Image: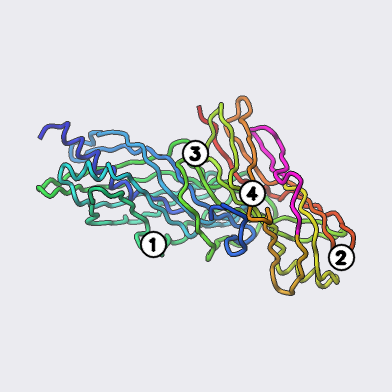
Amino acid sequence: MSPLPLRRRAAAVFAAILTLLVAAPATPANALDAEDLPPIGADAGRFNLPITCAITLPELGGLKVLDLPLNVDIQGVAPTQLGPGQQFFLTQGSGSMTFPRWLTDFGATFGVNRVDAIVTNMSIGARNATPTHYNIAGDGIHVNDIALTAGQELTVRLPVDPAATFPDIGPFTAPDAGVVTLQFDRAVVLITLKAAWGLVLKLKADCLPVAGNALLSMAVGGPAGQPPLAFHGVPLDFPRIPVNHQVGIINAPYRCTVLGQPFDVGIAVGAFTPLSVARSGAIRFTESSGALIIPAATVDRLLDAGITRASGRVTELTLAAAGGSPGATNVLGEGFAIPETTLTRGRDVVVELPPDDGTLTAGPWTPDPGSGHVKISLATAAAELSLNGQPPTPVRCATPSPEVILLDAPVTG
């Protein structure tokens, strides 16, 4: 057999087996529903990352066959902020990859109909944290006798069970200050191709991310000694998204002042965003929506103060950009009405934004000259509330501290 057909067979069937390269860790097509929200302080998201895989033949001295561009689809849950030295986990991680039918058709042309694979390395990194990465493949993930069917796309999920997720990834430990960024670092797969006519061919795939491999950036601040963070039971019902994009919901903790008293609330933001931005390009948040969450503990405090019903208007939610322009944008425009709500002890109040099942678009933000990243964070918020039918009173919400980062996109090109 000549080397060229051998390389073609290797490339064709490896493209199918790369569906195994899945890192462990709701599109807001309309306003966020209460049942879709993560807890205050949690970020739930789905990410479609471009990767490039070097394909080699181990039995021929590691001869390189080709560099294959692909993408990996990942989802999971992580904190929005970290305390100094705080331990944290990426939870509910799962993923998959899907390849078009022409890849399986091409493999079938040469009689390759079965594939075995061992995922030996699947590394999730945490830049500026300790350790810097975890290999979630452990002693290896074995998937045997994967069938290739001509005329069909090939989608493989890890974990294979559609109801399963990977064990909690961590613990990672935050530094004393700065920003921690969760990343997809690397995947290595050992592959055995099996053809109906007797061919057995071994390959190795070493895959690295391209451009925007950051899953989430978390600022570190506040008091030390906070307990470990690991969120479970968080809704994860996001649609498929284009390559180099993410979709998710961040539920950020806010401290708001009403009638001179501080109250804790949550402000949730959901959107489609890119993972990276070209130097001559722009960032836009599309199909965006949000929610104001008054947690049960705050509801109880309001009731204790004699406040039983509230209405009004949300007037401001400012996003602040670093490394991009404009520097600050109120994404709510003229704001949205808060319908009159009766408070019930022990129950959260969730106000959907916009309230009419619509969506918002924010941006564009363009990279500043010389900027390597464009970071967009939640800043101040404001509202006017009518309490027990009284004239409106202003509500001011300070920028979260430490900051809550919606997007930290590298600038490419």
Marker disc for residue 389: 2
Position in image of residue 274 (x %, y %): 53, 40
Q: Is residue 327 magenta?
A: yes
Relative to 234, say whether 150 is above or below: above
Question: Given the image, on which type of amino acid does mark 2 rest?
Answer: Gly
Distance from disc 2 to disc 1, alpha carbons, whole Å, reads 50 Å
Task: State the mark number for residue 220.
Answer: 4
- Judging depth in this view, the residue of 385 and 185 nearest the camera is 385
**Contact, CB < 8 Å: mark 2 with mark 4?**
no
Q: CA distance from mark 3 to mark 2?
A: 49 Å
- The kind of residue tagged 4 is Val
Marks 2 and 1, the one that precedes in the sequence: 1
Residue 212 has which mark?
Answer: 3
- Mark 1 highlights which residue? 162
Instruction: Answer whether labels 3 and 1 touch (C-beta < 8 Å).
Output: no
Sequence-wise, which precedes: disc 2 or disc 4? Answer: 4
Indicate yes or no whether the magenta region holds residue 321.
Answer: yes
Labels 3 and 1: the sequence-earlier one: 1
